[in-house]
Image (spheres, rainbow, N blue to C red):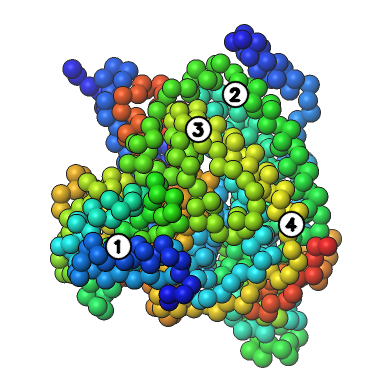
Amino acid sequence: MKTMSVAGAFWEGVKHVFKKTFTLKHPYQKRELPDGYRGRHLLYMDRCTGCGICAWICPEKCITLVPAAEEKAYPQNPEGRFPQYWYVRCCFCHFCTDYCPTGALDYTKDYDLAEYEKELIIWSPQRLSKVPEGYEGYRTKFHGWAGVNHVPSAREE
Amino acid sequence: MTAEHSAIELDIAAIVREQLGNATQVKVDRKGRVSVIVPREFARDAAVGLQRLGFDHAIAVSGVDYRSEKRIEVVYFLSSYSRDDLTHVVLSLKVQLDRENPSMPTLTAVWESVNFFEREAYEMFGVNFEGHPNLQKLLLQDNWDGPPPMRKDLKIPELA
Amino acid sequence: MSTLDLNVGPQHPGSGHMRIMVRTDGDLIVEATPDIGYVHRGCEKIAESRNIIKNIPMLCRPNIADDSHLNWSYVAPIEELQGVEVPERGRYIRTILCEINRIASHLYGMSIMAGIFSGHTTMYMFGFGDRELLLDLAEMLTGARLTFSFFVPGGVRRDLPKGFKEKLLETLDHIERRLPAIDRIFVSNPVFIERARGVGILRREHAIRLGVVGPVVRGSGVRCDVRKDAPYGVYDNVDFEIPALKEGDSLSRWLVRFEEIKQSISILRQVIRDIPKGPIARKSPIVVPKGEAISRIESSRGEINHYIVGDGSDKPYRVKMNTGSFKNLSALPFLLKGARIGDMPIIYGSLDYWPVEADR
């Protein structure tokens, strides 16, 4: 019967008045992000050899290798060149992370990268190597496909 | 090439060769893929023959610019809605055109779905489809006056 | 008879940018011409100047709600040309992500048609709220909510994380519990049925003649689906049905999507139960050998084809994409002719046209 079907639809809507909403009141309530979330990159300067594969594979050409002015010399990186990221162009595909042959790049959960000044959106190698608070390291726990390396996966039961 | 392919592709190849004659080259590339190469004069008859055979679904039309070989190829990909044994086959009907003046009769009367596909090939490669009901630009902006963009002559700047 | 030319302009609520030039006589549409190309970016031309891995994020962007199908359709011809076979676990993971994406994309399309284009936001909120759980699942697997770029030639990029199976089954149970609510408010509701039943009828012979694909053709009675006609991935190992309704109106196209969600839930349950152990990817060089290949993948809007011509270098010589929305475009002027202005959003919504996918 038509009236019964319309009444059923109304009743379904009325039931929702008494249900809890699942809206998150951002920024006061934040979502729990999973491990391996594709946020900004983390650079381990003691692993980077300056090979440039990350810059070569980047679809948006947002990575350039720059000499990082450091008193500490990194013996594995003879020319002292490290990647610098221009985050305006980055599409967060993380092919650079997966293709790095030494595992010098990693995933973090930082996604709030907006800046007021244009120059600050270019992240120098030193800024990239600052470990975020409470970060345990994704690659140290999980290994993925890792492009060139083919590190076997050590997950899932 | 022959042992892995199921009988239906070889049957189709044999029937097509028989119906369309010597002007066409028919090849079974792999399972479910047959290609037929025709010169432009024969394109319309080949299309009608293939439709009668049961290929009533034109899934795509693509142009390819072989600049070094001085030809433009327009490829019609065909499959079937109605014949159950042909639904897994994709037949590529390749029409080879001269690069200086690419022009061929339209196949809109055979498969109505190629209307928009041929318009795209027209604006991207400069192929003139004779008899098309509405040959106008589809995707490019109205005041585009450069060469057909998908040809290899037009080089786009590398992202710096 | 004097007619009025209306411009259903490039900006729409609930849809991407495309223009329909409509000529009306009072309330009846006499002629409708689509004008597309507002979001054309030249993907195919750009793809010729980048190597095959760099192309993956760009060629997945045309349809962000349904990204994994575009991705699979791009890497499949490259694998065929290279002769690389994806290991079985990799194919199962690909199927899982694709089916999650199919449910999410159908919820999107159904919400827009029964919600925004009907003039209210109830279905929109229902559909998008449930879709969030699916995006959370995809985020757990790939790291990103919408544009995954997860498949590479040779396999997938990551393995299933710990706890994924439980979360997937929990999400599927939740969606199954929500489907009767959608049924009561929309499928059985005479108000919605009045709006969509008998509107934009596409008969079987016209559907075949116009060459439409996807839920549009299945709503007109043609049981055509690449997953059954030319199975790829693991679709020949799972049991599922292809829903097809014969009325051919907007409501049938909507109901086909509703039924497909149920079938996708069943496919996911079978796949996660049967997934084998093993490697997830094989090594594959960054080169496209000489030759050409075409792929056929069933996305949520229809069949996608990628035609790749290789010349032996690391860049493809020609990439041609043909998506479901572009094929369904020929149905739009045909269906709008003779319809009323008030039915235009429902007809447009039932085709589930995604302008960026059609324009590339």
* Residue C114 rendering spot, x and y as whole percentages: 54, 28
Mark 2 surroundings: few (<14), some (14-19) or many (≥20) residues within 10 A? some
* Residue C296 rendering spot, x and y as whole percentages: 47, 57
Mark 4 surroundings: few (<14), some (14-19) or many (≥20) residues within 10 A? few
Disc 2/disc 3 C-alpha distance (Å): 17 Å
Which amino acid is tagged 2?
Phe
Pointers 4 and 2 in contact (CB under 8 A)? no
Pointers 2 and 3 in contact (CB under 8 A)? no
Numbered disc 2: what chain? Answer: C
Both on one chain, marks 4 and 3?
Answer: yes
Numbered disc 4: what chain? Answer: C
Tag shown at residue C209:
none
Disc 4/disc 1 C-alpha distance (Å): 42 Å
Which amino acid is tagged 1?
Ile
Judging by the rendered image, the residue that carries numbered circle 4 is C274
Judging by the rendered image, the residue that carries numbered circle 2 is C186
